[in-house]
Image (cartoon, rainbow, N blue to C red):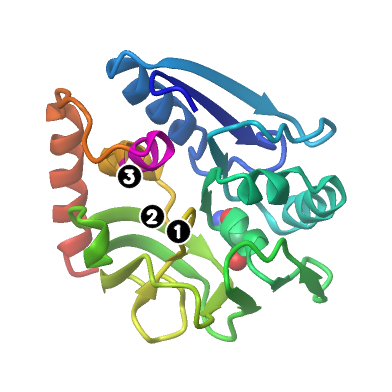
Amino acid sequence: MSQNSLRLVWVYPDLLSTYGDQGNALVLERRALQRRLDVQRVDVRSDQPIPTSGDIYLIGGGEDRPQRLAAERLRRDGGLNRAVANGAIVFSVCAGYQILGHEFINDLGQREQGLGLLDVVSTRGEGERCVGDVLADIDAPLGLPPLTGFENHQGVTHLGPTARPFARVQFGQGNGTGDGTEGAYNETVFGTYMHGPVMARNPHIADLLIKLALDVNALPPVDDRWYDALRAERIAAASQPA
Ligand code: GLN
């Protein structure tokens, strides 16, 4: 791709955009514009084909039934898998994260096939729903500051050998397996349980995705004071005993 353009694709806002996940598209777009990139954002509804020429794809969280519908339509469409095969970057949240794995339990209590873009399998947690603020340390090779977010999920996600944990929780449940992991990633595909929206609380994630898409090591700095204030407030809140 050209070094000064970026094509963002927001997948299925009509089905998968709970808890402010649309903010991720806004933050990513804004931070790319601040770097004077020529940004084109495409919002793809679930009755439309997924374009395969995007650089970064975003897919959010959702309730159990929309999650099943989204998985069915994405499997049938095949565009997201083709985009990843072309080298696209994908960032997914909660229901979107589960859909990118091999399978999850749907609203009918059945095993639903995912897209197999991340080596993870999601089951239904037997315990209480995972709800609340989260503070986690992002996997060291990614070189990012701590992750803050809000989780709300019943699913529990198990990582296979080719998925790395995106983070390890200090507070909260994350993947819900009890091993302290939160989210998963490989070279180009990322998944997290963090809502919030996560990029408003962790704008360095947006920058990471832009750098990967542009294949550059650094971006010009931008004013992060508002983000830093929000992060400090959320870290303080997450650190309070319930
Ligand atoms: N329905 C999924 C679960 O409960 C995802 C929920 C969500 O996206 N917030 O595990």
For residue 205, the mark is 3
> Quick one: label 3 or label 1, which is nearer the N terminus?
1
Query: Which residue is depicted at the point 28% across and 19% down?
Result: 35
Taking 166 as reference, is 145 left or right?
Answer: left
Residue to which mark 2 is pinned: 150
- 8 or 25, which is in the foreground? 8
Residue behind mark 1: 187
Measure the C-alpha gap from mark 2 to mark 1: 25 Å
Q: Which amino acid does label 2 sit on?
A: Phe
The residue tagged with tag 1: helix, strand or loop? loop
- Residue at 58%, 74% in the rendered image: 120
**Which mark is first along the chain, 1 or 2?**
2
- Looking at the rendering, the stretch of residues picked out in magenta corresponds to 208-215
Q: What element carries label 3?
A: helix
**Residue 7 falls in which quadrant of the image?**
top right
Q: Position of residue 69 (x, y in %)?
A: 82, 51
Callout 2: SS: strand
Q: Which of marks 3 and 1 is in front?
A: 1
